[in-house]
Amino acid sequence: MFTGRIARFDEPGKPFEIETVTLPEVGPGEILIRVSRANICGSDVHAWHGTFATRGLGGQLPTVLGHEMVGAIEALGDGASKDSNGKPLAPGTRVVFPYFFCCHECRNCLTGRRNACVNLKMAMLGRADEPPYFVGGYGDYYLLPAGAVVYTVPDTISDDIAAGANCALSQVMYGLERVDAQLGEYVVVQGAGALGLYAVAVAKARGAARVIAIDGVPERLELATAFGADDVIDITEVPEVKDRAKVVRRLTDGQGADVVVEVVGHPSAIDEGLKLLGQFGRYVEIGNINIGKTFEFDPSRFVFGNKSMVGVSLYDPAVLARALTFLEQNHDRLPLNRLAAATYSLEDINPAFTAAEAKRDVRASIVP
């Protein structure tokens, strides 16, 4: 038996309640993780508000939020002995894992679209009032189901850096892979939160000739420069979309961007982003997860501009292994430790979410 705390989430608008629960046992193939760090992602904040309805994904309330996490193995169920790269697992091994779980058998899984598995299960969707209880990252433990993809964290990568790998970093890596961002291309990143900063760094690592970050928070723009942005545009200093488009044209030799990555999470950003694209430009849409939000759109801009848009939800689980390689190769070069520098105890999860909502931190983290 394993006893630990969870931050129980009953419904939007209600404070989290810290509750002590007991997991009777770890079943065959399952892995019990002692959570060492769980970041507060934008989707967690949306779920907290009720604008990202976990019920619409098959989730139930009460639940435990939190998915962008890292931890160490507490217990291994029968048959769980190696990670997805074949490395041996043991109690104490630090690991990261996708926060969603594929069946590996359905049509989409078998055609390489595991992030669209028809039997997909996910953290934050299980019930917090029945076993296994530990169904989200905001708790002492998290239970990985049998067959989950899991990777050992290299010793050179600290928990604060590893925590963002299984969501923000893997998501933008997958997005840039989906549009095949090329050496020498111009990339614009809309939004310089955690996903935007990762997108800047990954685009540079893929050989972008110029990366331009757009945001309205000076501290985030400063961080974007530290993460490799060649230029930044402060929307408070350039408030008109048409003027920002002129700046992008000037910075891209009059061509416009080859790739624009949207991680703002507001529909209005899409209209602007499409105006920043040049001929044959590709738009990577990641941020808008609130159902029902719309914007006006002139489709002729797609046609005459030979443009395309790619929606990106989750990522192929194998991308997480590449994310770890990226962190291993760049942790000394990039200020990755600044992404989740603000930490809160599990008991302080309510003020942590208030801080995250106010965007006082790039990423706030819960350290149980």
Image (cartoon, rainbow, N blue to C red):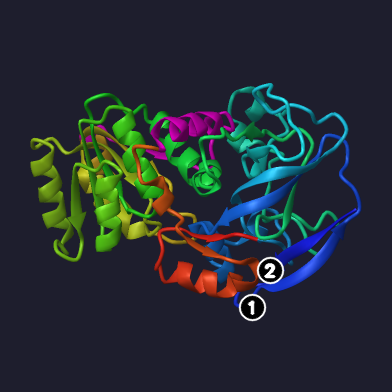
Residues at circles 1 and 2 in contact by the CB criterion of under 8 Å: yes
Q: SS at mark 2?
A: loop
Residue 74, located in which quarter of the rendered image? top right
**Residue 164 in picture, x, y percent from top left:** 51, 46
Reply yes or no: does residue 320 show up in magenta.
yes
- 320 or 70, which lies in front? 70
> Would you say 208 lies left or right of 101 here?
left
> Would you say 7 lies left or right of 312 here?
right
Chain part drawn in magenta: 305-331
**Residue 84 in picture, x, y percent from top left:** 67, 26
Vertical relation: 338 (above or below) 28: below
Q: Quadrant of the C terminus?
A: bottom right
- The tally of labels here is 2
Residue drawn at x 36%, y 42% as measured from the top left: 199
**Residue 360 in picture, x, y percent from top left:** 39, 68
Residue at numbered disc 1: 14
Residue at numbered disc 2: 9
> Would you say 357 lies left or right of 229 here?
right
**Residue 130 in picture, x, y percent from top left:** 85, 61
Marks 1 and 2 sit apart, C-alpha to C-alpha, by: 8 Å
